Image (cartoon, helix red, strand yellow):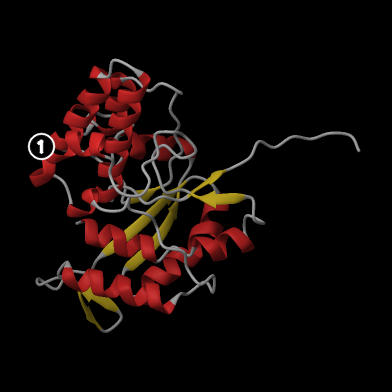
Amino acid sequence: DPRVRQAIALCFDFEWTRRNFFYGSYERSQSCFEKSDFRATGMPSPQELALLEPLRDQLPPETFGEAVTQPPSDGSGRDRKQLSAALKLLAQAGWKRSGDFVLNDKGGRLAAEFLVDDETFVQVYSPWVANMKAIGIDASIRLVDSAQYQLRQSTFDFDLLSAAFNFSATPTRDDLEIFFHSRSAAVSGSRNLSGVASPAVDALIDAVGAAKDRESLTTAMRALDRALRARRDWIPSWYLANHRSAYWD
């Protein structure tokens, strides 16, 4: 349920994490195609709408408004306003608070486990997990060795994990299919880790593949980015905005 994923995203206080763990080095990701011309901004252009309108009944309404972004927190580490909004989203999705946990109509707990293979991520994700617990999610972190991590990732045996990926300056249909197409959703070892399986997304990937020039490619990519962000299949984390270098002083 995208409301559950949005609620989990609201528990991540990036501003606090950036200040306390990253020393201000990283920026918040908002797009699948961050720092490129393919990142969607503002309202859809007429050219983007020409691609999106035929798919309107298959896409979230947010696709047709301002491009979805993650709201900044107050940087306190436990933004009460955002946690309250997260709890409301869970309630809308059918998860009601009962004691220390949120439960569904059958009495089952909402559980979420972060899968990591590096102690560093245990430290980084622990405040996020604490916020999830604060709103009733039975959240935890599981640290495994690299072999088990790779196996569980390739067989989609996880709730949450972190992944970094990038695309070329001119993404092809094949590049995008590996990450976002229905055909790769259940293929063991594919990069479609969030299991995107949407005919509308498939159609937008086809539009990228059919682009005849840079302008039409950019339009199709922005429409795709807009749709992916509105679906909330993944939770944007962070990226390094600059190139690091060392030199003798």
Q: Nearer the viewer, residue 8 or 117?
A: 8
For the residue marked with disc 1, what is the amino acid?
Pro
| Residue 186 visible somewhere in the drawing | no
| Above or below for 112 versus 67 | below
| Above or below for 237 versus 192 | below
Q: Nearer the viewer, residue 79 or 120?
A: 79
| Above or below for 244 versus 66 | above
Total numbered circles? 1
Q: Residues within 10 Å of mark 1 (few under 14, many from 20)?
A: few
- The part of the image, by quadrant, that contains residue 54 is top left
Where is residue 140 drawn, in percent x and y? 39, 62
Determine whether, in the image, residue 12 is placed left or right of residue 25: left
Q: Nearer the viewer, residue 58 or 52?
A: 52
Where is residue 195 drawn, in percent x and y? 24, 40
Q: Which residue is the site of mark 1?
A: 54
| Residue 146 visible somewhere in the drawing | yes
Identity of the residue furthest to the bottom in this view: 99
Q: Which quadrant holds the C terminus?
A: top right
- The part of the image, by quadrant, that contains residue 15 is bottom right
Determine whether, in the image, residue 168 is placed left or right of residue 136: right
User: SS class of the residue under badge 1?
Assistant: helix
| Residue sitting at x 25%, y 43% | 227
Where is residue 73 drawn, in percent x and y? 47, 68
| Residue sitting at x 39%, y 34% | 38
